[in-house]
Amino acid sequence: MSKPKFEVAQIIEQFGDDFVRKHNPNTWTLRTLNALRICRTAALGGHKEQCDSCGKLRISYNSCRNRHCPKCQSSKQAFWVEDVSQRIIDSKYFHLVFTVPEVLNSICLLDSKKFYSTLFSSLWQTLQTFGYTHYGVETGAIAILHTWGQNLSLHPHIHCLVPAAGITLAGNMRKISKKGKYLYPVIKLSVDFRSTMMKQLKKQLANSNQLLQYQSLIDKAWAKKWVVFSEPSFADANRVIKYLGQYTHRVAISNHRLHNIDNKIVSFFYKDYKDNSKRKLTTISGVEFLRRFCMHIIPKGFVKIRYYGILSNRFGKQVAMYRIPKLNPGKESVQQRLHRLTGFDVFKCPYCKKGRMHSIEELPRIRSPMKFLRPMKIILNK
């Protein structure tokens, strides 16, 4: 894929000060924005390389490795897909998406860490109950949190891959022979998920003495029809692993979706799912772009990819014989592993396409030549 013309880092650099003055974000948000802004710049240091064939020089700056950075996710995604293949059981899988109504967004923004934790616990409690009541087994799931819609709006939802298998009460593995389109009745699954989620949310608000303030939103959410999206099963476990890679390390927006940046506005492409997924262009102010982007910065230390039931470490020994055999590539460096998984050779000369790049000088970290956002300067100097 070609290098994008515009980057999120440019938006942070250009509109960051105005965003901070207007919205006064917390320290964690500032640290995240700063990491994205200086990613692959002289501020993080790097090394100078030279081709052993044509002699050309190249300077490679270090990455920030932040999980919200659009430039740092491709290698993480490839590695994660290979690692998670160790957990995959040779079985059919069903893709479920648990989402909540937009009316609950205000409650989510109060304490996103608690809200997302409640979302995770509610969906697993629902799946666990359905596994026992419908098939008499403890099922499992790989759950991945996404918080955004295509236009960067707040849209918390969790993608789940659920195997058609489970552990019986006697401790034996049982594969579920399911010929229908869905693993569980979707309508009842949606109703039970709504009930579980709302009960936990009300308890959470009551504990913080905020239930009375948000009771009207709770009532509106109860009145809405919740829908758990479900796709037909995947017959091939290898397809499941590839499919997972589409959802794991996504960020709110990629650099390739950015169309233009000028003195005041940012325009980017999005898919309009209400209009047959047509690709459309939207334009908003730079400050508004950063406000929306920051809604999707995951709280510090929060785990957004979780493994439940038979796909967790707790059942590792019991399901080991049912897992897909793992290839052992032997000892390899990060660069070698990346080449094996993606076909991208970081050492290949980008100029002559024949030689190999060799590091000849290490470049230390320096103060970024770009201006810092004022609150960020305080953080970096500590």
Image: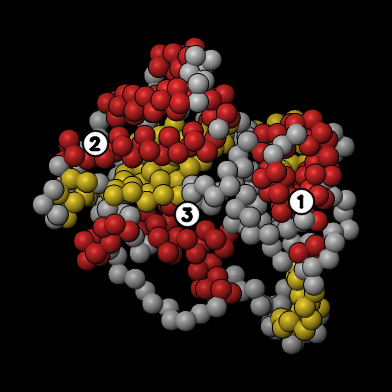
Specify few, some or many for label 1: CA neighbours under 10 Å numbering under 14, 14-19, or 20 or more.
few
State the residue position of label 3. Answer: 245
Dot 1 and dot 2 residues touching (CB under 8 Å): no
Residue 291 pos. (x, y %): 70, 34
Name the kind of residue labelled 2 in the image.
Answer: Thr
Determine whether the residue tagged by mark 1 lies in a helix, strand or loop: helix
Residue 127 as seen in the image, left or right of residue 348: left
Residue 84 pos. (x, y %): 40, 60
Q: Which mark is residue 101?
A: none
Residue that appears at 18% across and 45% down: 137
The colour scheme is secondary structure
State the residue position of label 2. Answer: 129
Residue 172 as seen in the image, left or right of residue 202: left
Residue 339 pos. (x, y %): 55, 73
Q: Residue furthest left?
A: 170
Mark nearer the N terminus (1 vs 3): 3
Q: Nearer the viewer, mark 3 or mark 2?
A: 2
Figure quadrant of the C terminus: bottom right
Cα separation between marks 3 and 2: 28 Å
Residue 13 seen in render: no
Quarter holding residue 204: top left
Determine whether the residue tagged by mark 3 lies in a helix, strand or loop: loop
Residue 13 as seen in the image, left or right of residue 245: right
Q: Is residue 227 above or below residue 254?
A: above
Cα separation between marks 1 and 2: 46 Å
Name the kind of residue labelled 1 in the image.
Answer: Ile
Quarter holding residue 279: top right
Q: Which mark is residue 379?
A: 1
